[in-house]
Image (cartoon, rainbow, N blue to C red):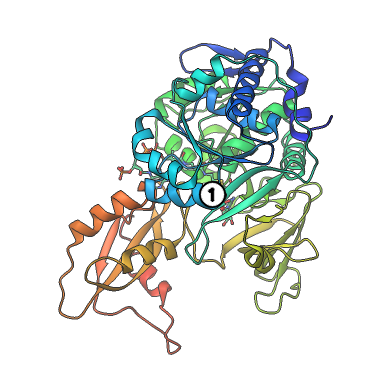
Amino acid sequence: MSNPLYDALLAPYEGRDTVFLHLPDGAALTHADFLAAVNRTANALAHLGVNPGDRVAVHVQKSPQALALYAACVKAGVVFLPLNTAYTPSELDYFVGDSQAALFVCDPAEADALRPIASGAGCHLHTLAGDGSGSLADLADGQSSDFEVVARSDEDIAALLYTSGTTGRSKGAMLTHKNLLSNADALVDTWRFTDKDILLHALPIFHSHGLFVATNVTLRAGGAMIFLPKFDIDEVLSALPKATSMMGVPTFYTRLLDDDRFTRELVAHMRLFVSGSAPLLAETHERFAERTGHRILERYGMTETSMNTSNPYDGERRAGTVGFPLPGVEVKVCDPESGQEMPQGAIGVLWVRGPNVFKGYWQMPEKTREELRDDGFFITGDLARIDEDGYVTIVGRGKDLIISGGYNIYPKEIELFLDEQHGVLESAVVGVPHPDFGETVVAVLVPEKGRTLDLGQIEANVKTSLAGFKRPRLFDVVDALPRNTMGKVQKNELRGKHANAFQ
Ligand code: MCA
Ligand code: AMP
C-alpha cells in the first residue's frame, strides 16, 4: 500500500526516539511521540466519518498538535486546508463553503462565532487550541495510536491552499503528493539539509513557506525544528545559538538587523539562512553579509508551484536575484501578449513547468485553463529577466498584488469591499514601500458627489470584515482617480504620490 508523502516524510520515523521538535518551554517531542499523535488524530478523523479525499479546513494557532493534524490528513488520505489565523468569520465562510469541507477545526475561543459557518456548510466543527487542548484533542486522546495508512497515488490531492485572485475571489490551489514530495526532494538536495540540521521555525504553518518548505524539508532530511509559535525577536535571538539553519520572509531579516543583539558571534555557527515569499532588497542582503558574514540564500516560489528557483548553495548567491531553476523545474520568460518566449535578457512574464506545478484550481476549470497551459507551463504573473549566467531576477509583477510581510494582499478584494461602503463612489488600493513589511496598503477613496466620508466607520468595518494584515494603513480621499485616456486607473501615479508616506 503506498502513500507517497507518508512513505517519504513520516514512515521512516516509526518507532524512532530521535527529536523532531524542540519546544519553547524546553521540552522536546520525539518522532515516535509525534507519530503516535498523528495516528490518534487520524483515528479521530475516521471516527468523525471524514473519508479519503474529503477536505479538513483548519483555522488554528501554530502548535505541534496542529502539525500532527496536517500529518494525520496525509496519512488518512484527507485533503488538508490550512487557513490564515488572521481571517475573519466572513472570510472563513467562503473557504469552508467553497471547499465543501467535511470538518472545520478552529480555536475553542472562536467556536461560538464560527459554528454558524460550519452548520451552513453542513460540516462538523471541532476545536484545537494553541496549547493542544480542544474537542478534537479530546476525541483523539481516546483513540488508538495505531492507524493503517491510506493508499494514495502521486496525483492525489494532499492539500488545498487558497490564494487570492486578481478578480477578488480566492482560488484553491490543488497540490498533489507528487507536487509536494518532488519539491521537498529538490530543496533537501539544493540546500543540503541533513539529519544534523536544526531549523529555526518561526513562520506560520498555514502557508506553503512554513508548512511545505520548512516542515517537509526537515522531515525529508531527518532533521529537527525549534518550533516557535511566531516570530518574536527575543525568542528568535535566544533560539539562534541552538539552530543550524533558518528560513524566513524578508521582514524577519530586517527585524534582526535592526536589533543590536544580532551579532556575528551569535550566528557564527549557522549553516544557512534562506529568504523568500517577498523580494529581499539587495541592500538587506549586503547589510546581512556585512554584519554576519553569511549570505542569505534567496529563493522564489508560489503557492501554486511551491519553490521554483533558488540561489546556489555553493556558488555565488547574487543579491537581488532568485537564482536558478530547481532540479526538474523549467522556467522561461514569455511575452505577456503573445506568449512567445522572449530573447535572453528581456523582461517578460515568467512561466514554470515541472513536477512541482499544481493540478489546478479547485472547481475553477476556466481559471485553471487561463493560467495552466496544456503543455504543463504555469503562467506565474511575475515579471522576470534571466541574465547571461542564468540567474533569474523578479523585476515586478504583472498581477495587481501587494506583498506585506510575506502575506499576499489583492487590491481588488479590498476595493470591492471599500466600494460598498456608505458614501464611497469608487476606490483604488495600492501598495507602497514600508520599512518593516516591505510594502503596505494605501486606499484612495472617491466620495459620492456632495458626501463627506465617515472614515472612522469605514475603518471599523474593514476591521470586522477583513484580516488585519489587509487593513489600509493610510486612507486618502480625493475628488477623482487619475485615469488614462482609456479610462484605466493610473495606479503608478497613486503609488508615486504616497511613495514616502512610511519611509
Ligand atoms: C501582522 N500584521 C501585519 C502583518 N502581520 N500587517 C501587515 N502585514 C503583515 N504581514 C499586523 C496585524 O494585523 C496586527 O495589526 C499587527 O500587525 C500585529 O500583529 P502580529 O501578529 O503581532 O504581527 P507580527 O508578529 O509582527 O507579524 C509580522 C510577521 C508575520 C512576523 C512578518 O506577518 C509573518 O510571520 N509573516 C510571514 C508570512 C508568511 O509565512 N508568508 C509565506 C506565504 P493591528 O495592530 O492592526 O491589529 S507562502 C508564499 O508566499 C510563497 C509560497 C513563498 O514563496 O513562500
Ligand atoms: P503566494 O501566492 O503567497 O504563493 O505568493 C507568491 C508570490 O510571492 C510570487 O508570485 C511572487 O510575486 C512573490 N515571491 C515569492 N518569493 C519571492 C522572491 N524571492 N522575490 C520576489 N517575489 C517573491
Ligand 1 in which quarter: top left
From what the image shows, is residue 217 above or below residue 241? below
Question: Whole-percent x and y of residue 336?
Answer: 65, 74
**Residue sticking out furthest to the right:** 1
Question: Whole-percent x and y of residue 383?
Answer: 61, 65
For the residue labelled by badge 1, is the local secondary structure a helix, a strand or a loop? loop
**What residue would you read off at disc 1?**
280
Question: Whole-percent x and y of residue 245?
Answer: 61, 28
Between 291 and 236, the one lying in front of the other is 236
Q: Name the quadrant of the N terminus.
A: top right
Q: How many marks?
A: 1
Amino acid at dot 1:
Leu
Is 180 on the left or on the right of 435, as rendered?
right
- Residue at image point 62% right, 65% down: 367
Is 225 on the left or on the right of 467, as rendered?
right
Query: Where on the picture, by quarter, is residue 44?
Result: top right
**Residue sticking out furthest to the bottom:** 485
From what the image shows, is residue 57 above or below residue 354? above
Estimate how packed mark 1 is, as few (under 14), some (14 to 19) or many (20 or more) residues with alpha carbons within 10 Å: many
Between 305 and 197, the one lying in front of the other is 305
- Residue at image point 75% right, 75% down: 340
From what the image shows, is residue 434 above or below residue 15? below
Query: Where on the picture, by quarter, is residue 195?
Result: top right
Q: Is mark 1 within 8 Å of ligand 2?
A: yes
Tell me if I can see residue 435 in this picture: no
Question: Whole-percent x and y of residue 38?
Answer: 63, 22
Tell me if I can see residue 107 in this picture: yes
Between 495 and 281, the one lying in front of the other is 495
Query: Where on the picture, by quarter, is residue 452?
Result: bottom left
Q: Name the quadrant of the C terminus.
A: bottom left
Is 140 on the left or on the right of 390, as rendered?
left
Between 81 and 418, the one lying in front of the other is 81
